Image (spheres, rainbow, N blue to C red):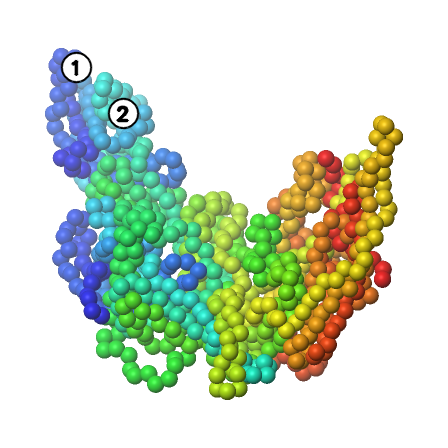
């Protein structure tokens, strides 16, 4: 810590015979025992929990909590006894009008002595994200897979020795912290304004300062990457960094969270012009399970960068893609983009029009108002990858369409058909089919229908 | 009360002597408030009840009755709501009930006068003798409002939660209710906040419901949320809710649960609590259900495909629309779950046969609908809810016949129906 900015003050006052209006007659500043930051990446919110030992007397105890110039959500601040739980009760929380960043707890205690308490609240200003690096062997059969969590400290302030927990999942928040701060009389500027950023920095600094105080002498020397502990909570997963962490001013810290070697994967090519464009795209697909040396936790959203060993101690960059959350036992599908070694050519062989319908006008002339158009196609797939490949093909149509093919084809949805091929290395495969499109008054539906061969 | 602050609820006992009309001679005491109750039952109006000991002189023909003056400023008091209620007579430090003397109560309010252009009123009070009378002055006051907040902590299995209901008082009424004997009344509770100062917010625990059974639901609603992302164009969000029932069988049922923010925590594996999310709880009367949106469940993946649709001509421009929807659902959670899928058939008809329906759709279920779907209609007949039970994901050591890890079961169900009588 280069600067100390203690913004939070916790004071304890014993109320003399609960007499109102009495000034504080005993003030202590109990030391923090620990600070824990739980950072959510789906919303700009960090849950700060600090523990302290407070001395209570029997009867009513008055505790004061104050903060300045920070984006703390006042409605979130809570005091919770961790010891003598049944004997200590927070009777009321008072937010004095004249001191906006200030509250007073009236705590009734039937116990006299020291007890551990937890003070928790939400602040704005810390973020984390996930990214992955996957390196495949030259034969493209197995991956070395690493996942990293990166905690960002853009506050302009350092922090030391805080316990860090990261929540994977999309929580629901109904109000933003800055809005809540405003509501309680704290003038906060609009997001993006320099003043707002300054407040965010201060908010983060506050928690950092606590963190700095918490561990005191710092963490022991670390000789290997920490093994992040993962545990499921409801629909979410929590990544806990063992021990405490220090992130210097303006830095972010990236820590290894997932490690798996020899992750076997499948390569699948897909043609879905409506989704990926005209060219076949290549996917690396593996399952997030124990069999693939993974499955300890879901894979949170993050960017995956794929490399391939070139056999000369070097690497080739194959591509990158943002993957969305992959549950345990679900398949991770990484799109490497268009593969120029696989060619898909659409080839229309023949067009025929028939089933004409006419409208006769008052002069006796006839006008075409409906017809059918039969298109015969023989699409071609060429595999230059040097090994057998699997191709999944989906074709989407609009209008009233009858679809015929000798190849096994199924309906994916009412306007899309799908089929799957395996093609040997260096070979070409044809996909013959015909479609009959009903036009004008002949069009009765908007759907594709599989009809006989 | 601090008269110097300009928030002047002023009570005076007056003795009217033979004075000219219009002259109000304020003679004696400013009896302090002994107790104040702020009643917050009504969401629109807040009732303040002040308890004071007012010395009254014996009413005689010569002296007339007692006059009690009550005035205020800078406070939004509803003048017509003010009441003066004698509740007892102090004798030897104790309160005794008001009795009748010669068929008349010992103390009685005769009338109330409202002086012009003043925030004041004057009670004429009869007293059979000289008494120290305990009275309650009550009135409706503005800008003294309340809101409710909730904190729910679920157990790890998410089957039961502890629900705390808090009341938060905002005192922007302009009145300082001091530090002595202030009580906040709500329903059957009377809370002691110690003091209620000006511009203060006071949050207090109102109820603690220790064991409230909770049911977790998973909901898929294609027409509300659309595609999940460009990589999964047929999947959509699965939302997680907690359902509580506000009745005694479910650990609640004492009071309605008023609207308020509910913050939800879960017990973590180390004896602490982790924040799960928050939602606005809607007004939940006794016997009704509260539904709280907690967040997105990303371990249940549901894809929805319209597998088949055709219009069938009935006559002229009258058509039926035949539709079959296929759902492919995977549960990656280690626990079995039930997915509720909402089908909005009005929206579906608008997409496939625009401007063809005239009010809610008329529809019938057809034979190829999967038998494992259970139907309910809590959102109305045009928005059936399809319930499908999903098995838990296989364990890490479970193998299929080929000795490979058993994959997550893909549950495929179909909903086939005909929307009848569409025309345009």
Q: Nearer the viewer, residue B42 or B320?
A: B320
In the image, taking residue A424 as reference, residue B396 lies left or right, namely left
Q: Is residue A144 visible?
A: no
Q: Is residue B24 above or below residue B306?
A: above
The residue shown at (23%, 37%) is B175
Q: Is residue B162 above or below residue B136?
A: below
Quadrant of the rendering where the C terminus of chain A is positioned:
bottom right
Task: Look at mark 2 in the image and give the residue it sits on.
Answer: B108
Looking at the image, how many numbered discs can be counted on the residues?
2
Please indicate whether residue B353 sits to the left or right of residue A164 in the image.
Answer: right
Residue A426 in picture, x, y percent from top left: 70, 78
B362 vs A237, left or right, is right
Residue topped by disc 1: B22
Please determine if labels 2 and 1 lie on a single subunit: yes
**Distance from label 2 to label 1 (Cα)?**
23 Å
Q: Residues within 10 Å of mark 1 (few under 14, many from 20)?
A: few
Q: Secondary structure at mark 1?
A: loop
Nearer to the camera, A364 or A134: A364
Give the mark toward the camera: 2 or 1.
1
**In percent of the image, x 66 and y 54: which residue is there?**
B386
Which of the two labelled residues, at mark 2 and mark 1, occupies the earlier sequence position?
1
The N terminus of chain A appears in which quarter of the rendering? Answer: bottom left
x%, y% of residue A8?
A: 23, 60
What's the residue at 30%, 71% (across, down)?
A247
Q: Residues within 10 Å of mark 2 (few under 14, many from 20)?
A: some
Q: Extreme top residue here? A: B20
Image location of residue A7, percent across then percent down: 22, 60
Question: From where the camera sits, is residue A240 visible?
Answer: yes
Residue A295 placement: quadrant: bottom right
Residue A300 at x, y = what percent? 49, 68
Q: Quadrant of residue A338?
A: bottom right
């Amino acid at each position: 810590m280069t600067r100390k900015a203690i913004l939070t003050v916790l004071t304890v006052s014993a109320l003399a015979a609960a007499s109102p209006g009495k000034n504080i007659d005993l003030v202590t500043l109990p030391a923090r025992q620990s600070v824990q930051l739980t950072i959510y990446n789906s919303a700009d919110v960090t849950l700060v929990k600090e523990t302290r030992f407070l001395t209570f007397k029997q009867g009513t105890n008055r505790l004061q909590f104050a903060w300045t110039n920070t984006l703390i959500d006042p409605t979130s601040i809570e005091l919770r006894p961790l010891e003598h739980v049944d004997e200590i009760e927070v009777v009321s929380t008072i937010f004095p009008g004249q001191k906006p960043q200030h509250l007073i707890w009236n705590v009734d205690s039937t116990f006299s002595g020291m007890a551990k308490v937890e003070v928790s609240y939400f602040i704005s200003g810390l973020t984390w994200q996930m990214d992955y690096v996957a390196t495949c062997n030259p034969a493209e059969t197995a991956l070395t897979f690493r996942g990293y969590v990166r905690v960002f400290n853009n506050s302009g302030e350092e922090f030391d020795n805080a316990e860090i927990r990261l929540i994977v999942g999309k929580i629901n928040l109904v109000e933003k912290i800055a809005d809540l701060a405003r509501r309680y009389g704290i003038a906060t500027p609009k997001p993006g304004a320099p003043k707002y950023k300054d407040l965010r920095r201060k908010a983060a600094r506050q928690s950092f300062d606590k963190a700095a105080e918490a561990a005191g002498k710092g963490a022991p020397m670390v000789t290997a990457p920490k093994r992040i502990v993962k545990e499921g909570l409801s629909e979410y997963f929590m990544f806990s960094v063992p021990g405490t962490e220090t992130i210097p001013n303006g830095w972010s810290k990236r820590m290894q969270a997932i490690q798996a070697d020899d992750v076997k994967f499948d390569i699948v090519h897909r043609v879905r012009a409506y989704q990926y464009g005209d060219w076949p795209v290549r996917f690396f697909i593996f399952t997030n399970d124990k069999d693939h040396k993974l499955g300890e936790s879901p894979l949170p959203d993050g960017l995956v960068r794929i490399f391939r060993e070139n056999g000369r101690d070097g690497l080739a960059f194959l591509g990158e893609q943002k993957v969305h959350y992959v549950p345990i036992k679900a398949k991770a599908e990484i799109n490497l983009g268009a593969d120029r070694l696989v060619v898909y050519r659409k080839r229309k062989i023949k067009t025929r029009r028939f089933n004409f319908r006419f409208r006769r006008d008052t002069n006796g002339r006839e006008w075409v108002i409906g017809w059918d158009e039969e298109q015969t196609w023989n699409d071609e797939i060429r595999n230059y990858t040097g090994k057998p490949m699997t191709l999944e093909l989906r074709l989407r149509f609009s209008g009233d369409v009858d679809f015929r093919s000798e190849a096994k084809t199924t309906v994916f949805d009412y306007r899309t058909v799908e089929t799957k091929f395996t093609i040997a290395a260096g070979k070409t495969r044809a996909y013959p089919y015909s479609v009959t499109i009903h036009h004008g008054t002949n069009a009765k539906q908007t759907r594709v229908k599989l009809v006989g061969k | 009360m601090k008269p110097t602050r300009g928030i002047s609820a002023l009570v005076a006992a007056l003795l009217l002597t033979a004075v000219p009309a219009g002259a109000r001679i304020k003679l004696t005491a400013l009896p302090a408030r002994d107790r104040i109750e702020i009643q917050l039952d009504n969401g629109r109006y807040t009732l303040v009840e002040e308890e004071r000991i007012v010395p009254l002189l014996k009413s005689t023909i010569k002296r007339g009755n007692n006059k009690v003056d009550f005035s205020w400023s800078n406070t939004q008091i509803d003048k017509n709501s003010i009441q003066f209620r004698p509740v007892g007579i102090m004798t030897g430090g104790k309160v005794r009930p008001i009795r009748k003397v010669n068929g008349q109560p010992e103390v009685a309010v005769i009338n109330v006068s409202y002086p012009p252009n003043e925030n004041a009123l004057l009670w004429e009070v009869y007293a059979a003798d000289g008494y120290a009378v305990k009275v309650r002055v009550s009135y409706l006051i503005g800008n003294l409002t309340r809101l409710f907040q909730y904190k729910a902590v679920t157990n790890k299995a998410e089957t039961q939660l502890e629900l705390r209901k808090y009341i938060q008082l905002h005192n922007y009424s302009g009145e300082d209710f001091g530090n002595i004997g202030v009580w906040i009344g709500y329903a059957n509770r009377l809370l002691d906040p110690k003091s209620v100062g000006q511009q203060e917010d006071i949050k207090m625990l109102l109820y603690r419901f220790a064991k409230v059974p909770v049911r977790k639901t998973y909901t898929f609603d294609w027409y509300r949320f659309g595609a999940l992302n460009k990589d999964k164009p047929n999947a959509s969000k699965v939302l997680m809710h907690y359902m509580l029932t506000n009745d005694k069988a479910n650990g609640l049922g004492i009071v309605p649960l008023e609207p308020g923010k509910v913050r939800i925590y879960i017990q973590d594996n180390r004896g602490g609590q982790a924040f799960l999310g928050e939602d606005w709880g809607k007004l939940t009367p006794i016997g009704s259900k509260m539904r709280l949106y907690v967040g997105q469940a990303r371990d249940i993946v549901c894809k929805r495909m319209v597998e088949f649709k055709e219009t069938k001509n009935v006559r002229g421009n009258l058509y039926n629309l035949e539709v079959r929807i296929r759902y492919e659902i995977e549960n990656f959670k280690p626990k079995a779950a039930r997915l509720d899928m909402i089908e909005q058939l009005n929206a579906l008809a608008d997409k496939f046969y625009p401007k063809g329906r005239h009010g809610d759709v008329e529809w019938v279920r057809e034979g190829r609908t999967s038998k494992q779907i259970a139907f309910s209609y809590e959102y109305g007949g045009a928005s059936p809810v399809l319930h499908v039970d999903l098995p838990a994901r296989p364990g890490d050591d479970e193998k299929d016949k080929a000795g490979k890890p058993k994959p997550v079961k893909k549950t495929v169900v179909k909903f086939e129906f005909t929307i009848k009588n569409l025309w345009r």
